[in-house]
Structures are given as structure tokens and as C-alpha cells.
Amino acid sequence: MKSASPIGSRSCTRRLVRLAATRRFAENPLGKVPVLLRPGLSPIFDSDVICAYFDTLHDGRRLIPQEGEARWHALRVQAVAQGLAAAGIAVRWETVRRPEELRYAPLRDGHTEKLIASYDWLEHELDFDAAVHVGHIAVATVLSWLEFRELPSFREKRPRLSAWLDAFSARPSMRATPLSGETHD
């Protein structure tokens, strides 16, 4: 008689999560992902820093423009994307993750307002037709995640942003990295 595999058991899952968390804290004192592990070199963590690092590894057009208003615009768009991620995570905590008796609706509503205001800003300020920059990648990633997690939608009343994300999502790099599974966001 075969014994059941422990892979799906709760105790095994808890051990794997603890190991993963232990590894994350060993590589990043904040215990957050992403962390870029480089053989023989110190790890690099935080999406911004990883993007800046990758941008130094080639001689082509930079994802982070090096000067002028193009630089500040790309970084502003990236900052809005980071704010969307933070607000989305907060909404998720107040609607799904936190025990229902501990949820605080005014906090959820305040973060939802930040999502809506940021969606509106992007509809008017995103440089839809410009060459791809770090802000575009950050916005596409976070909007995809917000949809994946079924958080308040950006699509209604924002046709340019919606069409842009649909087109950007067709890029091979986006299709090669689909979102899936559960996380602790």
C-alpha cells in the first residue's frame, strides 16, 4: 500500500512557506520580493532598483531615460504604479485578507479612492504612444495584477488606458509572465 504524499498537507505547506520566508529575509531584510540573486554578488531587491540595474546591462535605449522631462515623466508614472500597488494591497487586506470582524470600511474606501484617482490620472497623463519606459512596464504590471485580484476596475470611463493595457498585454514579455496562484499580498 502506498503512503500519501505530504506535499499537499498543511504542515508541509507551512514548512515550505517558512523556508521561503527565511530565504527572503536572508536576501532582503524587509522579507519582500522581488529579489534578484546574482551569482557571486550581493542580491538586489525592490523592483525599482532591479529595473535600474537591468538598464545598465545593455547599450540600447534605456527604460529609464537618463535626462530631461522624459526621465521625470517615466519616474512619475512608475511612482503612480507603485502607489496603485500599495493601495490595491490595502484594499485586498480590508476586503479579503483580514478577518471580517477586523476590517475597517473607511480605510478600504480611502484606498479605493486612491485607485480611482490614479486611474483617472493615467487616463490623462500616460504617454500611450511613447517608446516603452519603466513607467509603462510598472503600470502594465500593476493594472494586470489589479484585474487578476478582481480589485476595483480601471476600465469603465477610461477607454485609452484600457486599450493601451490590452495592446501592451499582447507583448510577448507580458504573455510569457502570466499571473497565477495565491500570494500573501
Image (spheres, rainbow, N blue to C red):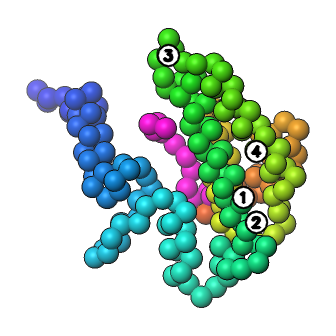
Residue 182: in magenta span:
yes
Q: Secondary structure at mark 4?
A: helix
On screen, residue 62 versus residue 159, left or right, reads left
| 2 and 1 marks in contact (CB < 8 Å) | yes
Who comes first in sequence, dot 1 or dot 3? 1
Q: Say which element carries label 3.
A: helix
Magenta-drawn stretch contains 80: no
Q: Identify the residue shown where x is 61% and y is 30%.
A: 91
Q: Earlier in the sequence, mark 4 or mark 2?
A: 2
Query: Is 102 left, or right, of 19 in this rendering?
Result: right
Provide the residue designation for mark 4: 118
Pick whichever, 65 or 3, lies toward us. 65
Q: Secondary structure at mark 1?
A: helix
Question: Mark 2 is on which residue type?
Answer: His
Q: Which residue is mark 1?
A: 77
* Residue 142 makes an appearance in the image: no
Viewed as shown, does residue 13 lie left or right of 156?
A: left
Q: Which residues are magenta?
A: 174-185
Residue 102 image label: 3
Question: Seen from this angle, which residue lies furthest top?
Answer: 101
Provide the residue designation for mark 2. 73
Instruction: Return the x and y of residue 63 as percentages of the image width and height.
Output: 65, 73
Q: Earlier in the sequence, mark 2 or mark 3?
A: 2
The x, y position of residue 122, in whole percent, is 80, 51
Q: Quadrant of the N terminus?
A: top left
Q: Secondary structure at mark 2?
A: helix
